Image (cartoon, grey):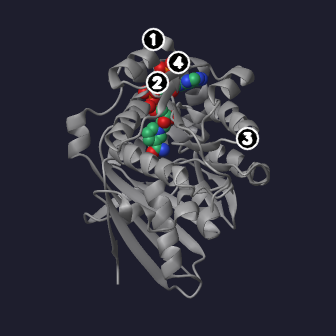
Amino acid sequence: MSGFPLTGPWLLYGANGYTGELVARHALTRGHRPILAGRREAAVGALARELGLEHRVFPLDDPARVEGGLEGMSLVLHCAGPFARTFRPVAEACLHTRTHYLDVTGEVAVFEALAGRDAEARGAGVMLLPGCGFDVVPSDCLALHVKRRLPSARRLALGFEMRGRLSRGTATTALERIHQGGLVRRGGVLTPVPAAWRTRVIDFGRGPRSGVTIPWGDVATAWHSTGIPDIEVYMAMPRSLRLLLRTSRGFGPLLGSRPVQSLLRWRVRSGPPGPTEEERRRGWAFLWAEAEDEAGRRAVSRLKTPEGYTLTALTAVRIAERVLAGECPPGFQTPAKAYGPDFILGVEGVQRTDEE
Ligand SMILES: NC(=O)c1ccc[n+]([C@@H]2O[C@H](COP(=O)([O-])OP(=O)(O)OC[C@H]3O[C@@H](n4cnc5c(N)ncnc54)[C@H](OP(=O)(O)O)[C@@H]3O)[C@@H](O)[C@H]2O)c1
């Protein structure tokens, strides 16, 4: 399964961000000693000294310095987003230096761009595996699980309900595409739809809730994992938020304009970096997947997981461990394609149930 023999330690880029720091701390508890990296000495150095780890500082706008930053590494776990702005220099450097690439993006455009580098990555023996966090590890595993239960499936609906707050980085990333509306997959093709295009009442695991379609990463990845051509992703939302999303449809250009984006970013920056430890401890997520075939047969399964950022740290470190163990099929991968639909069951606090 290995692309090439693994040597040396691994690099965690964006280590000083909210998610990067959670990953670094969790990695330490599992006996790893990642080299921490980022673009600011003050922030990365301080964290590295506190955790007793080595660190490297390099920006992403100089390819030679990025390649230098990866020297001696067998893999990089990239946690600096929005990834639409940051994935390319890191992925390029990985392909040149034959370093395996992992990230925690949930951005459809990033998944698709990396999928487009599949042949190149295979040629280099490098694994490109984006989406190692809450988006998309549990939903990707659940998608492949329902496909396994109903191999004739032609339609896939995924959804989740969660308790927890967004980090500043996630909110900033979401803002960048807020004016672009929704996305679903139809006949294997990514298809733009209006924001909150469809509403469905779904039992995600805690009784019926209203969910609306959102442009979640799985509209990209579940196609690569399952080959099911029609895919929609739903998120449970209170009525007020559903209405707000629908109202936003008429304001796309305004929401995407520079002054409104600056104002929204300023609002996000003035908030806390992410959920507190206590909020993460009290948080949870329920995920649901429904596969359906042309004859109307259905397979429905659910997952219960820890809170999203906690889960991200757990799954990203587990995946890094699989890579270090030599399990790194070359080319573009999704979590479930690389490690199977049951990978998520090995993560603490995760339970799966199948509807009869
Ligand atoms: N898929 C998932 O389930 C999942 C889960 C968690 C997070 N995420 C994503 O991960 C990203 C980070 O989230 P977060 O909450 O950790 O955000 P954050 O606290 O704002 O941290 C962002 C990190 O990225 C770095 N960074 C940003 N732009 C950069 C650039 N152009 N060059 C180099 N470094 C750059 C920042 O460095 P400075 O401190 O120097 O600015 C910081 O280290 C977001 O895109 C978020 O959506 C996804």
For the residue carrying disc 4, how many other residues have a C-alpha within 10 Å: few (<14), some (14-19), or many (20+)?
few
Q: Residue 80 in the image: x percent, y percent?
A: 53, 30
State if disc 2 and disc 4 touch (CB < 8 Å): no
- Amino acid type of the residue that numbered disc 1 sits on in the rendered structure: Ala
Q: Amino acid at mark 2?
A: Glu
Which residue is the site of mark 4? 262
Q: Reading the chain from its start, which is encountered first: label 4 or label 2?
A: 2
The correct choice, above or below, for 161 with respect to 89 in the image is: below
Disc 4/disc 2 C-alpha distance (Å): 35 Å
Asked which secondary structure carries label 4, the reply is helix
Residue wearing tag 1: 42
Report crowding for label 3: few under 14, some 14 to 19, many 20 or more residues within 10 A (C-alpha).
many
Split into 4 quadrants, where in the image is the C terminus?
bottom left
Residue type of the residue flagged with mark 3 = Leu
Task: Identify residue for label 3.
Answer: 95
Element type where label 1 sits in the image: helix
Residue positioned 60% across, 76% down in the render: 154
Q: Earlier in the sequence, mark 1 or mark 4?
A: 1
Determine if residue 218 is in view.
yes
Query: Alpha-carbon distance for marks 1 and 4?
Result: 26 Å
Q: Which residue is mark 2?
A: 54
| Front label number (4 vs 2) | 2
Looking at the picture, tell me which residue is in the foreground, 314 or 167. Answer: 314
Distance between mark 4 and mark 3 Cα atoms: 34 Å
